[in-house]
Image (cartoon, rainbow, N blue to C red):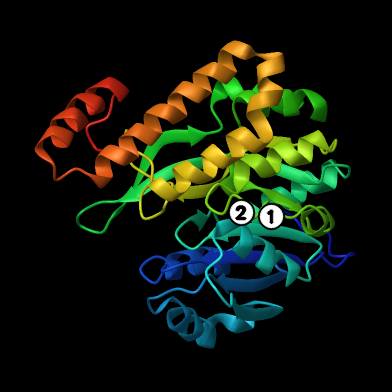
Amino acid sequence: MTKIDSRKEPVLVSACVITYNSSRTVVETLDSIYAQTYPRLELIISDDCSTDDTVEVCRKWLETHKDRFEDTSIIQMEKNGGIAANLNFVIRATKGEWLKSIAGDDLLLPNCISDNMEFVSRNENDGVIFSNVREFYVDAEGKRVLTDNYQPAESAKKYYAMAAEEQYNRILSLCFTPSNSVFWKRSVAVTHPFPEQYPYNEDDPHWLHLTKEGIKLSYFDKTTVLYRIGDSISKGRDNSFIGEKYHYSRLAYLYADRYFELLKRDPGRARQLQKEFFLGDVAIVLLKNRRNFFTRAVLFFFKLLVGTRKIS
């Protein structure tokens, strides 16, 4: 457990949970926040118009756990707006000096917030901080299984030593940040909202915009978050194919923010991305017509071409 200077009151940190049809997993998420070793927390849950009983599950949990927190609340979007809008909604509702956001199916390790605050105390000028994320899944027997997959990749860690401008150039080609681990100053989060025009690809364009504006992404080499594989629009185990909404959010982001700038700096990479997204478009068209025998045959060979047999 991180030592807190008893002569100085710890600053308030806001734990921000975003949910959408998360009733099966959100209690685990909330329990992981409850178990944090950092003493002074606010908990805000923001729901994106769930059609299941997520909100009721959260309310029942708060009835017996709210005394652990300095303040708690559940807020609800008026209409389903996607991940980016939900994040912006919950960030605006916070009061903490620092924020830790988490999806309603992922988990914080017990020292997550304490470790981040210790890093902050040694690096006062850093406002957007990333750490390591480990993947896990729940097996058929309901047991949590930790994988050997971590983010960021070892090869990507060197990019955090770069200046913001160099990080921007790298993210144009390939984003290297494990967004689930982000810990940041509220002042930065509020003044730099997530781009809501990409509702299901909220993270990559956000880090691109931040670095373009000269805000450096920082990193410390410790695992703080467990990332659940599956149960999400953009999550899939092994080599599963991505979802349609996620694909089209990424496609819009490619042509609005990345492609033409990347074409000037790295034409080969720009054209490679163009081809990859074209293949994704073809896959989605085939999936929408998969009952047709000819289409099913083409889909089979397409799966072989793109290296996945789990398109669904």
**From where the camera sits, is residue 35 visible?**
no
Q: Residue tagged by mark 1? A: 114
**Amino acid, disc 1:** Ser
| Residue found at the very far left of the displayed protein | 293
Within-10-Å neighbours for mark 2: few <14, some 14–19, many 20+: many
At 72% across and 28% down in the image, what residue appears? Answer: 160
Give whichever of 236, 95 is nearer the camera: 236
| SS type, badge 2 | loop
Residue 19, position in %: x, y?
50, 67
Using the image, determine if residue 245 lies above or below residue 41: above
- Horizontal side, residue 120 vs residue 115: left or right: right
Is mark 1 in CB contact (under 8 Å) with mark 2? yes
Give whichever of 172, 180 is nearer the camera: 172
Give whichever of 180, 168 is nearer the camera: 168
Using the image, determine if residue 172 lies above or below residue 19: above
- Horizontal side, residue 84 vs residue 272: left or right: right
Q: Residue tagged by mark 2? A: 111
Q: Which mark is residue 49?
A: none
At 63% across and 27% down in the image, what residue appears? Answer: 259
Would you identify the image quadrant in which residue 220 lies? Answer: top right
**Amino acid, disc 2:** Asn
Residue 169, position in %: x, y?
72, 23
